[in-house]
Amino acid sequence: MSQSTTFHIRNWCAWAPGVDTPDAWREWCAGDRDIADSGTPRVDFLPANFRRRLSRVSKMALAVAFRCLEEAGTDPAAVRSVFASRYGDVATTLGLLHDIVAGEPLSPTRFSLSVHNASSGLFTIAAKNHHPSTAVSGRRDTFMYGILEAAGMLRHTASPPVLVVMTDEPLPEMYAAFRDGDEVAYAIALLLCDAEPGMPVSLDHRSGTQSTNVAGEPECQALSFVRWLLSDKSGLTLSGQSLDWSWQRPRTDNGH
Amino acid sequence: MEDLKNELRELIISTLEMEDVSPDDIEDDTILFGDGLGLDSIDALELGMALRKTYGIRINGKTNEVRQNFATISSLAEFVAAHRQAPE
């Protein structure tokens, strides 16, 4: 069974440690640049009293969210938003669990921002945005479920456009046994809308072959998607946990 | 008391991760919450936890005059001096 949907990608931007411009991403695609082990994006555009509480994951999310909207000339208060992350702020959560085990009181700040929708809340506060916002997680398919959520919102109501933000960072050492191919930190934001301007794309998903092979898993979907955006290929198929996702776009547009 | 005030300046900056603020920015009578330094209710909880860890003070929202005691570095220092115990 196949489900097809179409929409436009008005703008996108991505950040990873050491790879934070379109040219740097092209070098990364060509194998001439690696994503570094550490690094945090600057979020100086946010007020100091707001910024100081943000974890690295939230800084990553807000950095790409605001940059993507600024480049598109879109008011940050005038979008709906979907924040996708497989693990969320797992480093903060693990720190809180360590505090509980040690009998230490929990930091109210870290506790309040350890929830999966922390970045969603922080974005809407910083942007003074009153439109719907949600946070999703979906195992290996987290990125695509974020896109699907946004596509559903666009299908339901054409405007305002929907910002999709995907972030993840490597699992802490303690959870090493659960690592699943996602060994780098990255953030990507896409502004999706139901009409021009933007690159028209169509998305199909169908039951795939259930992947049970953990060792040697392919690159995470969001980074494969960036490779595709910066290529001249018209089609892309991403194999997920139990679905195959097929993207199509006109052959000539390279997405930027 | 001056030593304690400086200790509290450092404690506020480190506990609340105020990387853009230096101890000199916080005067004895700078309003800590709201307009002055811009702290809010989550910061109050965080600061209460730090006072407990550092000075063994348990803040009781019902009996302590929290708003008054947390108003400035001066009032906070008086409060800590009067209630400090060996850290837990």
Image (tube, coloured by chain):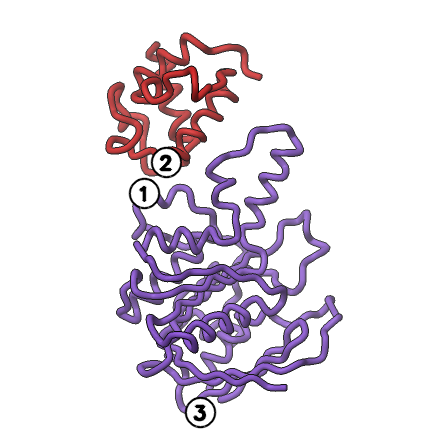
Chain colours: A purple, B red
Residue lying furthest bottom:
A251
Cβ atoms under marks 1 and 2 closer than 8 Å:
yes
Pointer 1: what residue? A48
Q: Which chain does the numbered disc 1 sit on? A: A
> Residue A251 bears which disc, if any?
3
Tell me the crowding category of disc 1: few under 14, some 14 to 19, or many 20 or more residues within 10 angstroms, Cα based: some
Q: Please say if B9 is above or below A16.
A: above
Q: Can residue A19 be seen at all in this image of the molecule?
A: no
Q: Residue at x 39, y 56 (%)?
A: A62
Query: Three-letter amino acid code at disc 2?
Result: Met
Tell me the crowding category of disc 2: few under 14, some 14 to 19, or many 20 or more residues within 10 angstroms, Cα based: some
Q: Please say if B61 is above or below A232.
A: above
Q: Secondary structure at mark 3?
A: loop
Residue B61 location, quadrant: top left
Q: Which chain does the numbered disc 2 sit on? A: B
Mark-to-mark CA distance, 1 and 2: 8 Å
Cβ atoms under marks 3 and 1 closer than 8 Å:
no
> Residue A176 bears which disc, if any?
none
Query: Which sits in the foreground, A253 or A128?
Result: A128
Query: Which sits in the foreground, A244 or A39?
Result: A244
Q: Residue at x 41, y 8 (%)?
A: B82
Q: Residue at x 59, y 78 (%)?
A: A238
Q: Residue at x 37, y 37 (%)?
A: B19
Query: Three-letter amino acid code at disc 3?
Result: Arg
Residue B14 in the image: state x and y as whole percent: 42, 31
Residue A176 in the image: state x and y as whole percent: 69, 53
